[in-house]
Amino acid sequence: MRRHPCRGEAGRAVTESSGEGVPSERGAAVGRGIGIGLMYGLWRPRVLGAWRVPATGPVILAVNHSHMIDGPMLMGTAPRPVHFLIKKEAFVGLLDPFLLGIGQLKVDRTSADRTAITNALGVLEGGGVLGIFPEGTRGDGDFASLRAGLAYFALRSGAPIVPVAVLGSTERGGRLIRALPPLRSRVDIVFGDAFAAGDGSGRRTRKALDEATVRIQGRLTAHLENAKRLTGRWVRLE
């Protein structure tokens, strides 16, 4: 395989995980380091409950999605390297080898992307951390509409789900880009208790998938409400 022109640890990670297979954890670890520098340099993250993420073994982080920085924020604040499923439209130009190099997964949201599904399951089978935006796209970030992908990965792998609420500043001033919180504003990242998606029966039928999606939505919505109370996000912040 041709070596990526970058040097050092990041260059090695890009080389190892630049293919279409299961991404390397080393790449995700490099991405975590980049996320730490970027997020703590531009904003003021406050991380609550990170100890709830299992220290070892497969786990799925289910994250609400209302800001462009939600993915990088999680990469920089989660206690373990995270492999996110990211829409293929983001993999353009130099971002394509970069995102692949830091262990992220490209997914075509317009179809059942078998490659992305196989690689995501491979991450979990290898005991890694899979990050998913269960709403499918950036919106209000309230978990009001969930796609079935999260339930499928959880039922298929047996991995526990950890709900994560990313709550950015409500202030409008200081924004360089509309979809970003103001620079140096506080961003709260609240991890919830891990839970199983299934009902214990081991079923993987379409009905079981639908039922699991409803259960998951209830748990994620409850976590988001608790996170807002815990951080004072029910009221306007200074």
Image (spheres, grey):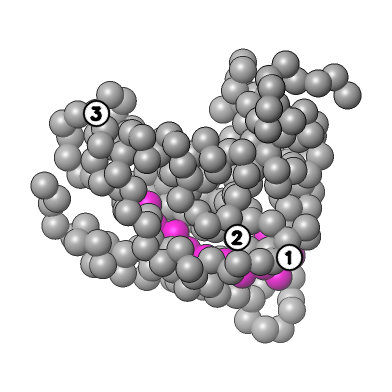
Q: Secondary structure at mark 2?
A: strand
Q: Position of residue 235 (x, y in %)?
A: 14, 57
**Front residue of this view, candidates 96 and 88:** 96
Residue 80 coordinates in the image, percent (x, y): 58, 55
Type of residue at label 2? Ile
Per the model, the C-alpha gap separating discs 3 and 1 is 40 Å
Q: What separation in Å lies between label 3 and label 2 (alpha carbons)? A: 31 Å
Query: Which of the two residues, 198 or 237, is positioned nearer the viewer here?
Result: 237
The answer to whether residue 162 is magenta is yes
Q: Which residue is mark 2?
A: 60
Q: Is residue 118 magenta?
A: no
Q: Residue at x 60, y 67 (%)?
A: 55
Residue drawn at the location 19% of the way across and 61% of the way down: 232
N-terminal of the pair, mark 2 or mark 1, is: 2
Q: Which mark is residue 157?
A: 1
| Front residue of this view, candidates 214 and 13 | 13
Q: Is residue 211 visible in the rendered structure shown here?
A: no
Say if mark 2 contacts mark 1, CB within 8 Å.
Answer: yes
Residue placed at 54% from the left, 40% from the top?
A: 33
The crowding category of the residue bearing disc 3, from other C-alpha atoms within 10 Å (few below 14, some 14 to 19, many at least 20), is few
Which residue was labeled with disc 3? 175
